[in-house]
């Protein structure tokens, strides 16, 4: 984690959850993270609606040149990144594991901006597929940020994070079994060599 906002939010989230998979959403006190609120967001876990923003910090909104509340999180990403972003949100919600990733974009004049993304689950009555929180923070702050809005984000490298800042093993999601069958922990698809 490179950005101070990312590290601070992760450390606070980790402290609030204790030994649980994720903290309850009511455990998050905005005053305790006031220094990072401008880079923070909360998403609704709603696949059909593209995981809309419930709350977006002022710096996040300023970067895109508009208020993001109610807008699709998935819609902020370029076409090649959207499927992976949907999958990442799904993994964070269902596996109760955080993800930190790099992202890149450009403004209308073509100036590049690198950002750091953090997505963390929040619990509601022990379910972690209701809300997610995170940060979207610029790695460097160019003079034009907040004046010239940025375009679609492109997802870069990513890693999953657990109880510390150290990476954890990738979550074990089981793919759908279309035209396949499970055998000894593997999915077997008919076809191929005879």
Image: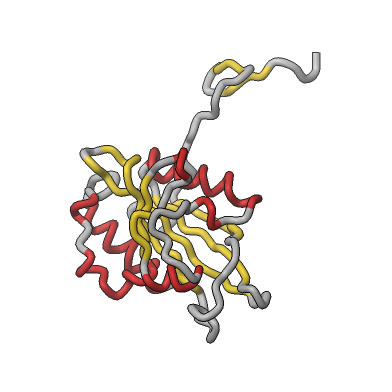
Q: Left or right: where does residue 161 sit relative to residue 155?
A: left
Q: How many marks?
A: 0
Q: Position of residue 129 (x, y in %)?
A: 34, 40
Q: Position of residue 180 (x, y in %)?
A: 61, 18
Frontmost residue, 125 versus 69: 69
Screen quadrant of the C terminus: top right
Frontmost residue, 56 versus 134: 56
Can residue 35 be seen here? yes
Screen quadrant of the N terminus: bottom left
Query: Residue, x 26% and y 72% (percent of image)?
Result: 34
Frontmost residue, 133 versus 152: 152
Residue farthest to the bottom? 143
Query: Residue, x 61% and y 73% (percent of image)?
Result: 107
Query: Residue, x 47% and y 51% (percent of image)?
Result: 72
Q: Residue 16 appears in which quarter of the rendering?
A: bottom left
Q: Residue 35 appears in which quarter of the rendering?
A: bottom left
Residue farthest to the top? 194
Q: Position of residue 160 (x, y in %)?
A: 46, 51
Q: Is residue 3 above or below residue 131?
A: below
Q: Position of residue 159 (x, y in %)?
A: 50, 54
């Amino acid at each position: 984690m490179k950005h101070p906002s990312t590290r601070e939010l992760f450390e606070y989230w980790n402290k609030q959850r204790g030994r649980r998979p994720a903290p309850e959403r009511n455990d998050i006190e905005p005053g305790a993270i006031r220094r990072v609120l401008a880079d923070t967001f909360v998403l609704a876990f709603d696949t059909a609606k593209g995981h809309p923003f419930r709350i977006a910090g002022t710096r996040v909104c300023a970067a895109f040149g508009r208020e993001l509340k109610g807008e699709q999180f998935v819609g902020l990403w370029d076409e090649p990144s959207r499927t992976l972003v949907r999958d990442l949100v799904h993994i964070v919600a269902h596996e109760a594991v955080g993800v930190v990733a790099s992202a890149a974009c450009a403004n209308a004049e073509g100036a590049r901006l690198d950002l750091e993304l953090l997505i963390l689950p929040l619990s509601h009555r022990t379910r972690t597929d209701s809300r997610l929180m995170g940060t979207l923070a610029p790695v460097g702050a160019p003079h034009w940020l907040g004046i010239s809005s940025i375009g679609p984000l492109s997802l870069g490298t990513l890693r999953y994070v657990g109880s510390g800042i150290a990476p954890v093993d990738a979550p074990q999601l089981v793919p759908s079994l279309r035209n396949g069958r499970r055998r000894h922990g593997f999915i077997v698809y008919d076809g191929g060599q005879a």
